[in-house]
Image: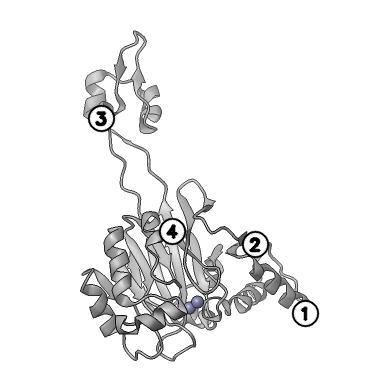
Amino acid sequence: MIFDVHILGSGSAFPQLHRNMTAQFVNVLERHILIDCAEGTQLQFQKFKIKPSKINIILISHLHGDHYLGLQGFLSSMQLFGRTKPLDIYAPAPLQDIIYMQLKATGNYLTYKLNFHPLTSTETELIFEDKVIEIHTIPLDHRVYCNGFLIKEKIKPRRINKPACDIENTPIAMMHRLTKGEDWVQDDGRIIPNAQLTLDPVRSRSYAFCSDTKYAPSIIKIIKNVDLLYHEATFLHEMLARANKTKHTTALQAGEIAKEANVGKLLLGHFSVRYKTPELLEEEAKTVFENSIAVSDGDKFSIG
Ligand SMILES: [Zn+2]
Ligand SMILES: [Zn+2]
């Protein structure tokens, strides 16, 4: 029951030898998702031994270079590798023209189907779902149109309480309906409430990615109770004026968001290149939310 988040890049602005810019690989129940694709992301795949050909969904937060300038190279390499399976991209609408303009200029046409899903809404929306997972946007407050993403398992079926069903002689034919939450209406009209025959579902797991953004309490209701939250922490709080001006968040504010949203664990990233190491940012977030971690490229977090 895999739900893993691999940090491929956790810096901001420009590449550094020890820290590349934003990209993450999420494997949720064998759905392989790439979130953002900064320049150099292909090398990070190689460095951390992840096969990029597995990716079938790409989510792009916004069109600042440190979040998407690796995408064209990635698409081109997929073609060189002989990809034939479709690829779905969810990104701000103008990216579609950028991609196709580059393809046209180079006379290159992809060997696989690229399904581009333009994002334009400033309200949270469900952008992808299948039988077991959902992906929602998290509208952020940045200098350009920007979304975070909430990836979560769907609510699972209720579990049959076998001893209780045995006592009531519940027919096998009723079991599937019970897992969907229906009461058992017997032939004589007697109703046995669902809660008497079933147990709560196994908890559904969730991950929220929020970068880049100004401190945005509006996201708290969307990310409430997620198991894992990645939130940008570009600056220390002493740089609040700069954070406000550039529409970024301080480590202290990231901790406040995590606390208010009651998340399980907070991952901090997107550090300004002025910080050679992120210890101070982690310490600052921990003053309000203890379970905070400043991530490094190559880190992997599993949601159990
Ligand atoms: Zn950025
Ligand atoms: Zn940005």
Residue designated by label 3: 162
**Which numbered dot is residue 150?**
4
| Disc 2 element | strand
Q: Is residue 2 visible?
A: no
- Distance Cα–Cα, label 1 vs label 3: 64 Å
- Distance Cα–Cα, label 3 vs label 2: 46 Å
- Distance Cα–Cα, label 1 vs label 2: 19 Å
Instruction: Report the side of 48 relative to 225 (left or right).
Output: right
Callouts 4 and 2 close, C-beta under 8 Å: no
| Disc 4 element | strand
Three-letter amino acid code of the residue under disc 4: Leu
Residue depth check, mark 3 versus mark 4: number of the one nearer the observer: 4
**Sequence-first disc among 4 and 1:** 1
Q: Which quadrant would residue 72 be assigned to in this image? A: bottom right
Residue depth check, mark 1 versus mark 3: number of the one nearer the observer: 1
| Disc 1 element | helix
Three-letter amino acid code of the residue under disc 3: Lys
Three-letter amino acid code of the residue under disc 1: Ala
Residue designated by label 2: 116
**Sequence-first disc among 3 and 4:** 4
Q: In the rendering, at what x and y percent does residue 79 appear?
A: 67, 73
Residue designated by label 1: 105
Instruction: Report the side of 192 relative to 137 (left or right).
Output: left
Q: In the rendering, at what x and y percent does residue 244 appear?
A: 41, 77
